[in-house]
Image (cartoon, grey):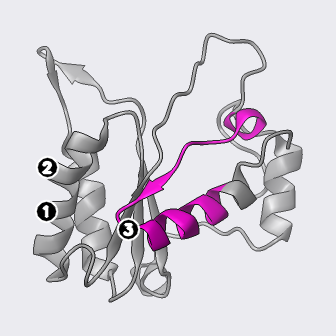
C-alpha cells in the first residue's frame, strides 16, 4: 500500500497518515489471526432478481470465523441492518468458529449511510453511530470508531 486509495472517499493525505500511524493491509491469515477487533465492511448490498445477494457478506463472516479467538470483537459496518447481523452473520461466525456470541466473542454494529451524491461527503467528516452486543462492547466499539471517524478530521 502506497497511500493512494481507489475511491475519492479517503484523501491520499489521510491514508498516508494512517499508514504512518500503523495501518496495514494484509490477506495473510496468520497475521489476521493475531487481531482481536474485526470490522466487516461490504459495499451496498447488490440486488439480484429483486433479492439481496448476501454471498459477499456470508463469505466475509466465514473468513472471520476461521481466525476468531475468544474475547474478540466483530463489528458489522454495512447498510444491511441489524436483522441481517443477528439472523445471518452471527450464526455463520458461531458455526465456523465454534464460539458463541456474548460468551466466546462479541458483536458490534455501525450502520453505513454513505451518500455518494453529496459533494464533499466523507464518513470521517460526520462521525458514525455504533452499538455493541453488551454495554461494555458498545463502549469499546464507540471508542475505536471515535478514534477513526472523529468528526472534523
Query: Does 57 sit left or right of 5 as displayed?
Result: left
- Measured as percent of width and height from the top left, residue 70 is found at 32, 89
SS at mark 1?
Answer: helix
Locate the C terminus by quadrant.
Answer: top right
Residue 134 bears which disc, if any? 3
Which of 46 and 131 lies nearest the eye of the viewer? 131
In percent of the image, x 52 and y 28: which residue is there?
113
- Measured as percent of width and height from the top left, residue 77 is found at 45, 47
In percent of the image, x 46 and y 77: which residue is there?
28
The boundaries of the magenta stretch are 123-145
SS at mark 3?
Answer: loop
Task: Select label 3 or label 1 by which is in front.
Answer: 3
* Gap between marks 2 and 3 measured at Cα: 17 Å
Among numbered discs 2 and 3, the one appearing first in the sequence? 2
Q: What residue sits right under mark 1 in the picture?
A: 91
Is residue 1 among what the camera can see? no
The reply to whether dot 2 and dot 3 touch (C-beta < 8 Å) is no
The local crowd at label 3, few if under 14, some if 14 to 19, many if 20 or more residues have their Cα within 10 Å, is: few
* Gap between marks 3 and 1 measured at Cα: 17 Å
Among numbered discs 3 and 1, the one appearing first in the sequence? 1
Quick check: is 134 in the magenta stretch?
yes
In percent of the image, x 77 and y 48: which residue is there?
150
Picture quarter containing residue 127? top right
Query: In the figure, 108 relative to 110: above or below?
Result: below
- Measured as percent of width and height from the top left, residue 26 is found at 54, 70
Picture quarter containing residue 81? top left
Amino acid at each position: 500500500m502506497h497511500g493512494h486509495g481507489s475511491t475519492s472517499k479517503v484523501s491520499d493525505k489521510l491514508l498516508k497518515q494512517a499508514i504512518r500511524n500503523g495501518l496495514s493491509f494484509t490477506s495473510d491469515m496468520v497475521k489476521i489471526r493475531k487481531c482481536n477487533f474485526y470490522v466487516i465492511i461490504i459495499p451496498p448490498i447488490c440486488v439480484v432478481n429483486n433479492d439481496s445477494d448476501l454471498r459477499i457478506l456470508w463469505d466475509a463472516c466465514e473468513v472471520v470465523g476461521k481466525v476468531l479467538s475468544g474475547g474478540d470483537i466483530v463489528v458489522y459496518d454495512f447498510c444491511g441492518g441489524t436483522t441481517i447481523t443477528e439472523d445471518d452473520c452471527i450464526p455463520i461466525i458461531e458455526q465456523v468458529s465454534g464460539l458463541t456470541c456474548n460468551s466466546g466473542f462479541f458483536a458490534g454494529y455501525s450502520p453505513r449511510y454513505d451518500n455518494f451524491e453529496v459533494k464533499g461527503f466523507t464518513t470521517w467528516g460526520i462521525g458514525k453511530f455504533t452499538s455493541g452486543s453488551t454495554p461494555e462492547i458498545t463502549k469499546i466499539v464507540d471508542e475505536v470508531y471515535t478514534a477513526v471517524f472523529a468528526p472534523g478530521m
